[in-house]
Amino acid sequence: MNKRVNILGLAFENTTLDGMTETIKQRIAANKKTFIVTANPEIVMYANEHADYMNTLKNADFIVPDGIGIVIGSKILKQPLEERVAGFDLMHNLLHVANEQSLRVFFLGAKEHVIPKTVQNISKAFPNLIVCGYHHGYFDWHDKSILTMVKEANPDLVFVALGYPKQEMWINDALPLFEKGIFMGVGGSFDVWAGEAKRAPELWRKLNLEWLYRFIKQPARWKRMLLLPRFLVKIIKEAKKSNCGNKKKHA
Ligand code: UDP
């Protein structure tokens, strides 16, 4: 099994949700600063169209396939990834680890009225983890006091829910200032924890239709959804290219 699979320029971890959780657990034990990106096809396409964002993602320690589109893409490229690792599920597992080890967790992002509910519900579910701080995600990008606040909280884990590309850009800028910590962008997960948004029911998730559920619930996202077919077309072109390359090699 390849450890990493290249999908349109990004090296995805070929692992499972449990495998990834274990890897991060080891990084926590070793005090290793870690940048995790959970990327879906929208993110891959955005990175392919924005070089600065692509470079930011390349600084990540781990890129995990959050979205069935990425797994399908890996199959078309004939380098199948083990499974989808949903950002929400990985965050859930890491909260569990934080709870077991009474780790310090900072939550940055979501709307001002949402974040206290997120924190309250997470604290209820995981009473042993330490909420070392939280802040909403609508702050001035140039206001460095937020960064100072996170740093002074001395977190073991920092979950950043600013949506892409902001959350990864924020983490990338912040990282050099920290000595330790697991940093992960989690998109709309805080809204789900707060009860402001719903995850797709389990059956939809099992059928790999979470994207369709989100589309029905948030039709305003349709423009972003158009990136998915474009992603698949790009993947098919890429697969053809590497097929031709292989044929030439063997000719
Ligand atoms: N958000 C934020 N600050 C911003 C823009 C967005 O805190 O400047 C939050 C927003 O309230 C939501 C999350 O980021 O909680 C974005 O969720 P979305 O599902 O759009 O994530 P994406 O799919 O864009 O990564």
Image: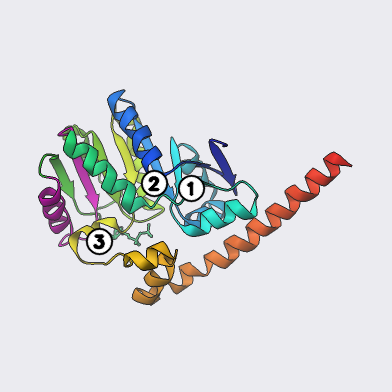
Residue 186 visible, this orientation: no
Residue at x-position 32% and y-position 37%? 174
Give the image location of residue 117, x and y in percent: 13, 58
| Residue 150, position as x, y percentages in the image | 21, 39
Say which residue appears at 33% left-offset and 67% top-offset.
Answer: 200
In this rendering, does residue 101 appear at all? yes
Q: Which residues are magenta?
A: 101-126
**Residues marked 1 and 3 touching at CB (< 8 Å):** no
Residue 128 pos. (x, y %):
11, 39
**Secondary structure of the residue carrying numbered label 2:** helix
Mark 1 vs mark 3: in front: 3
Q: The disc labelled 3 sits on which kind of residue?
A: Val
- Decide: marks 1, 2 in contact (CB < 8 A)? yes
Q: Which residue does the numbered mark 2 point to in the structure image?
A: 168
**Spatial CA span between label 1 and label 3:** 26 Å
Judge left or right: residue 40 versus residue 118. right
Mark 3 nearby-residue class (10 Å; few <14, some 14–19, many ≥20): some
Q: Secondary structure at mark 1?
A: helix
Q: Which residue is mark 1?
A: 53
Residue 124 location (% of width, % of height): 10, 51
Q: Quadrant of ligand 1?
A: bottom left
Q: Amino acid at mark 1?
A: Tyr
| Callout 1 crowding tier (Cα within 10 Å): few <14, some 14–19, many ≥20 | many
